[in-house]
Protein backbone atom coordinates (compact mmCIF):
# COMPACT_ATOMS: atom_id res chain seq x y z
CA UNK A 1 0.00 0.00 0.00
CA UNK A 2 1.13 3.56 -0.63
CA UNK A 3 1.96 5.51 2.53
CA UNK A 4 1.07 9.18 2.63
CA UNK A 5 3.02 11.42 5.01
CA UNK A 6 1.97 14.96 5.80
CA UNK A 7 4.12 17.65 7.36
CA UNK A 8 3.93 19.34 9.65
CA UNK A 9 1.46 17.54 11.90
CA UNK A 10 0.50 20.83 13.49
CA UNK A 11 0.95 24.34 12.16
CA UNK A 12 0.32 27.60 14.01
CA UNK A 13 -0.26 30.75 11.99
CA UNK A 14 -1.83 34.21 12.09
CA UNK A 15 -4.83 35.39 10.13
CA UNK A 16 -3.47 36.80 6.88
CA UNK A 17 -0.43 34.51 6.76
CA UNK A 18 0.51 32.35 3.78
CA UNK A 19 0.89 28.71 4.77
CA UNK A 20 2.01 25.57 3.00
CA UNK A 21 1.30 21.97 3.93
CA UNK A 22 3.29 19.15 2.37
CA UNK A 23 2.15 15.64 1.49
CA UNK A 24 4.63 12.98 0.39
CA UNK A 25 3.79 9.63 -1.17
CA UNK A 26 5.92 6.51 -0.65
CA UNK A 27 5.91 5.96 -4.43
CA UNK A 28 4.88 7.98 -7.46
CA UNK A 29 1.18 8.75 -7.76
CA UNK A 30 1.42 11.03 -10.79
CA UNK A 31 -1.15 13.77 -10.05
CA UNK A 32 -3.79 11.58 -8.44
CA UNK A 33 -4.04 13.48 -5.17
CA UNK A 34 -6.92 15.12 -3.36
CA UNK A 35 -6.96 17.55 -0.43
CA UNK A 36 -9.75 17.80 2.13
CA UNK A 37 -10.55 20.27 4.90
CA UNK A 38 -12.10 18.96 8.12
CA UNK A 39 -13.49 21.02 10.98
CA UNK A 40 -14.11 19.54 14.45
CA UNK A 41 -17.10 17.23 14.50
CA UNK A 42 -17.67 17.61 10.77
CA UNK A 43 -17.03 15.50 7.70
CA UNK A 44 -14.09 16.18 5.42
CA UNK A 45 -14.81 18.59 2.57
CA UNK A 46 -13.14 18.24 -0.82
CA UNK A 47 -10.93 21.21 -1.69
CA UNK A 48 -8.67 20.08 -4.52
CA UNK A 49 -8.39 17.03 -6.78
CA UNK A 50 -5.89 15.87 -9.37
CA UNK A 51 -3.29 17.74 -7.33
CA UNK A 52 -4.23 21.24 -8.49
CA UNK A 53 -7.86 21.44 -9.63
CA UNK A 54 -9.90 23.57 -7.28
CA UNK A 55 -13.31 22.13 -6.46
CA UNK A 56 -16.21 24.38 -7.41
CA UNK A 57 -17.04 26.89 -4.67
CA UNK A 58 -13.65 26.64 -2.92
CA UNK A 59 -12.03 30.06 -2.42
CA UNK A 60 -9.17 30.89 -4.76
CA UNK A 61 -6.80 31.47 -1.83
CA UNK A 62 -6.44 27.69 -1.77
CA UNK A 63 -4.09 26.15 -4.30
CA UNK A 64 -2.42 22.80 -4.82
CA UNK A 65 0.66 21.75 -6.69
CA UNK A 66 3.02 18.85 -7.20
CA UNK A 67 3.34 15.55 -8.98
CA UNK A 68 5.04 12.24 -8.48
CA UNK A 69 5.74 11.94 -4.77
CA UNK A 70 5.66 15.48 -3.39
CA UNK A 71 2.64 17.75 -3.17
CA UNK A 72 1.73 21.00 -1.46
CA UNK A 73 -1.43 22.74 -0.37
CA UNK A 74 -1.04 26.49 -0.02
CA UNK A 75 -3.44 28.95 1.56
CA UNK A 76 -2.41 32.39 0.40
CA UNK A 77 -4.02 34.61 3.06
CA UNK A 78 -5.42 32.75 6.02
CA UNK A 79 -8.95 33.58 7.05
CA UNK A 80 -10.49 32.67 10.44
CA UNK A 81 -12.62 30.03 8.70
CA UNK A 82 -9.51 28.22 7.43
CA UNK A 83 -8.38 26.95 10.82
CA UNK A 84 -9.07 23.23 10.52
CA UNK A 85 -7.38 19.91 9.83
CA UNK A 86 -6.25 19.16 6.28
CA UNK A 87 -5.92 15.67 4.82
CA UNK A 88 -4.35 14.48 1.60
CA UNK A 89 -5.47 11.33 -0.20
CA UNK A 90 -3.83 9.40 -3.02
CA UNK A 91 -6.13 7.72 -5.50
CA UNK A 92 -3.56 6.39 -7.92
CA UNK A 93 -3.12 2.91 -6.51
CA UNK A 94 -5.41 0.45 -4.80
CA UNK A 95 -6.29 0.90 -2.01
CA UNK A 96 -6.55 4.66 -1.93
CA UNK A 97 -4.98 6.02 1.25
CA UNK A 98 -4.90 9.18 3.33
CA UNK A 99 -2.26 11.16 5.14
CA UNK A 100 -2.48 11.46 8.91
CA UNK A 101 -3.68 15.05 8.74
CA UNK A 102 -2.26 18.50 9.47
CA UNK A 103 -3.95 20.60 12.11
CA UNK A 104 -3.82 24.32 11.32
CA UNK A 105 -4.15 26.35 14.50
CA UNK A 106 -4.57 30.06 15.06
CA UNK A 107 -1.57 31.75 16.65
CA UNK B 1 -27.59 19.08 -3.93
CA UNK B 2 -26.53 15.62 -2.88
CA UNK B 3 -26.80 14.84 0.82
CA UNK B 4 -25.92 11.68 2.71
CA UNK B 5 -26.73 10.65 6.25
CA UNK B 6 -25.55 7.63 8.24
CA UNK B 7 -27.73 5.76 10.70
CA UNK B 8 -27.40 2.69 12.88
CA UNK B 9 -26.43 1.48 16.34
CA UNK B 10 -23.80 3.57 18.11
CA UNK B 11 -22.66 0.79 20.44
CA UNK B 12 -21.71 -2.70 19.30
CA UNK B 13 -20.40 -5.57 21.40
CA UNK B 14 -17.08 -7.22 20.57
CA UNK B 15 -17.39 -10.18 18.16
CA UNK B 16 -20.76 -8.94 16.89
CA UNK B 17 -21.49 -7.24 13.58
CA UNK B 18 -21.60 -3.50 12.96
CA UNK B 19 -24.37 -2.41 10.59
CA UNK B 20 -24.86 1.08 9.22
CA UNK B 21 -27.13 2.54 6.56
CA UNK B 22 -26.54 5.60 4.42
CA UNK B 23 -29.60 7.46 3.16
CA UNK B 24 -29.01 9.51 0.03
CA UNK B 25 -31.04 12.49 -1.18
CA UNK B 26 -30.58 14.67 -4.23
CA UNK B 27 -29.19 11.86 -6.37
CA UNK B 28 -30.26 8.38 -7.35
CA UNK B 29 -27.84 5.63 -6.39
CA UNK B 30 -29.35 3.36 -9.05
CA UNK B 31 -28.35 5.53 -12.01
CA UNK B 32 -25.34 7.56 -13.02
CA UNK B 33 -21.63 7.01 -12.97
CA UNK B 34 -20.88 7.22 -9.27
CA UNK B 35 -19.88 4.54 -6.84
CA UNK B 36 -20.98 4.94 -3.24
CA UNK B 37 -18.61 4.20 -0.41
CA UNK B 38 -17.68 4.03 3.24
CA UNK B 39 -14.69 5.56 5.03
CA UNK B 40 -13.84 5.48 8.72
CA UNK B 41 -11.76 7.66 10.98
CA UNK B 42 -10.19 6.48 14.19
CA UNK B 43 -7.77 8.43 16.39
CA UNK B 44 -5.03 5.93 15.94
CA UNK B 45 -5.19 5.38 12.19
CA UNK B 46 -6.66 8.48 10.58
CA UNK B 47 -8.96 8.11 7.58
CA UNK B 48 -9.32 4.66 6.07
CA UNK B 49 -11.28 3.72 2.96
CA UNK B 50 -13.46 0.67 3.64
CA UNK B 51 -15.11 -0.06 0.33
CA UNK B 52 -17.32 1.12 -2.52
CA UNK B 53 -20.27 -0.19 -4.52
CA UNK B 54 -21.84 0.55 -7.91
CA UNK B 55 -25.50 0.07 -8.70
CA UNK B 56 -24.57 -2.78 -11.06
CA UNK B 57 -23.51 -4.74 -7.99
CA UNK B 58 -19.79 -4.24 -8.50
CA UNK B 59 -17.97 -3.81 -5.19
CA UNK B 60 -14.43 -3.01 -4.10
CA UNK B 61 -13.16 -3.53 -0.58
CA UNK B 62 -9.98 -2.55 1.22
CA UNK B 63 -8.03 -5.80 1.51
CA UNK B 64 -7.30 -5.07 5.17
CA UNK B 65 -11.02 -5.47 5.91
CA UNK B 66 -12.26 -7.52 2.98
CA UNK B 67 -12.87 -10.73 4.89
CA UNK B 68 -15.25 -8.92 7.28
CA UNK B 69 -16.95 -6.30 5.08
CA UNK B 70 -20.10 -6.35 3.00
CA UNK B 71 -21.58 -3.33 1.25
CA UNK B 72 -25.05 -3.62 -0.21
CA UNK B 73 -27.69 -1.39 -1.80
CA UNK B 74 -31.43 -0.95 -1.51
CA UNK B 75 -32.19 1.10 -4.61
CA UNK B 76 -35.91 1.24 -3.80
CA UNK B 77 -35.03 3.25 -0.68
CA UNK B 78 -32.03 5.04 -2.22
CA UNK B 79 -29.86 3.65 0.55
CA UNK B 80 -26.68 1.66 0.81
CA UNK B 81 -25.36 -0.23 3.81
CA UNK B 82 -22.21 -1.40 5.52
CA UNK B 83 -21.83 -4.59 7.50
CA UNK B 84 -18.59 -5.26 9.37
CA UNK B 85 -18.46 -8.59 11.16
CA UNK B 86 -16.50 -9.80 14.18
CA UNK B 87 -15.72 -6.33 15.46
CA UNK B 88 -13.11 -5.51 18.08
CA UNK B 89 -12.20 -2.34 19.92
CA UNK B 90 -9.96 -1.47 16.97
CA UNK B 91 -13.10 -0.94 14.89
CA UNK B 92 -14.25 1.92 17.11
CA UNK B 93 -14.34 4.92 14.77
CA UNK B 94 -16.42 7.57 13.12
CA UNK B 95 -17.93 5.98 10.03
CA UNK B 96 -18.69 8.15 7.00
CA UNK B 97 -20.60 7.35 3.84
CA UNK B 98 -19.74 9.28 0.70
CA UNK B 99 -20.31 9.52 -3.01
CA UNK B 100 -17.20 8.65 -4.95
CA UNK B 101 -15.76 10.49 -7.89
CA UNK B 102 -13.78 8.55 -10.43
CA UNK B 103 -10.05 8.38 -10.16
CA UNK B 104 -7.70 6.39 -12.33
CA UNK B 105 -9.99 3.39 -12.08
CA UNK B 106 -13.27 2.86 -10.19
CA UNK B 107 -11.58 1.08 -7.31
CA UNK B 108 -9.44 4.12 -6.51
CA UNK B 109 -11.86 7.01 -6.12
CA UNK B 110 -11.87 10.22 -4.20
CA UNK B 111 -14.90 11.33 -2.21
CA UNK B 112 -17.43 14.12 -2.47
CA UNK B 113 -19.71 14.78 -0.75
CA UNK B 114 -19.55 13.03 2.62
CA UNK B 115 -22.21 12.31 5.19
CA UNK B 116 -21.92 13.89 8.62
CA UNK B 117 -20.47 10.71 10.11
CA UNK B 118 -21.53 8.54 13.01
CA UNK B 119 -19.38 7.38 15.93
CA UNK B 120 -19.58 3.65 16.54
CA UNK B 121 -18.05 2.34 19.73
CA UNK B 122 -17.18 -1.31 20.20
CA UNK B 123 -17.47 -2.22 23.85
CA UNK B 124 -19.10 -4.79 26.07
Image (cartoon, coloured by chain):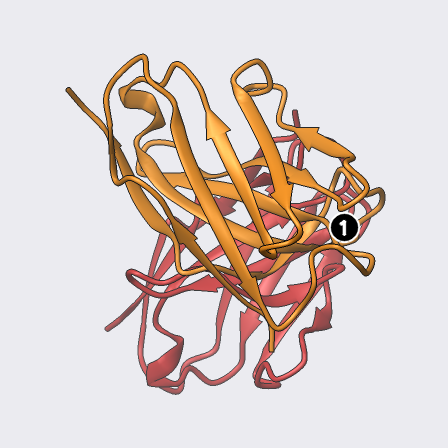
Chain colours: A red, B orange
Q: Is residue A27 left or right of residue B24?
A: right
The quadrant where residue A17 appears? bottom left
Q: Is residue B98 left or right of residue B42?
A: right
Q: Is residue A61 left or right of residue A71?
A: left
- Which residue sits at x=63%, y=42%? B73
Does residue B76 show up?
A: yes
Does residue A99 show up?
A: no
Q: Is residue A56 left or right of residue A36?
A: right
Which is nearer the eye, A5 or B78?
Answer: B78
The image shows residue B118, relative to residue B28, as above or below, that is above
The image shows residue B69, relative to residue A61, as above or below, that is above
- Which residue sits at x=65%, y=24%? A1
* Residue A56, percent from left and from top: 67, 80
Judged from the image, the secondary structure of the residue bearing numbered disc 1 is: loop
- Which residue sits at x=67%, y=68%? B27
The image shows residue A103, relative to residue B8, as above or below, that is below
Which is nearer the eye, B114 or A21?
Answer: B114
Looking at this view, name the residue that lies furthest to the left: B124
* Residue A74, percent from left and from top: 56, 70
The image shows residue A60, relative to residue A8, as above or below, that is below
* Residue B45, percent from left and from top: 40, 32
Residue linked to disc 1: A32
Subunit under mark 1: A
- Say which quadrant the C terminus of chain B sits in: top left
* Residue B117, percent from left and from top: 39, 53
Amino acid sequence: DIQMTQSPSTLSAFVGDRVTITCRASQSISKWLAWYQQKPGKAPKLLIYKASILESGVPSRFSGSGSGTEFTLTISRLQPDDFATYHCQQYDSFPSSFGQGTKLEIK
Amino acid sequence: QVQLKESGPRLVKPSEALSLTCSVSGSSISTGVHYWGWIRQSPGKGLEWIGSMFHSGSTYYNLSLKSRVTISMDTSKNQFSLRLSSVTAADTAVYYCARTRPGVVPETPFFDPWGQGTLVTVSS
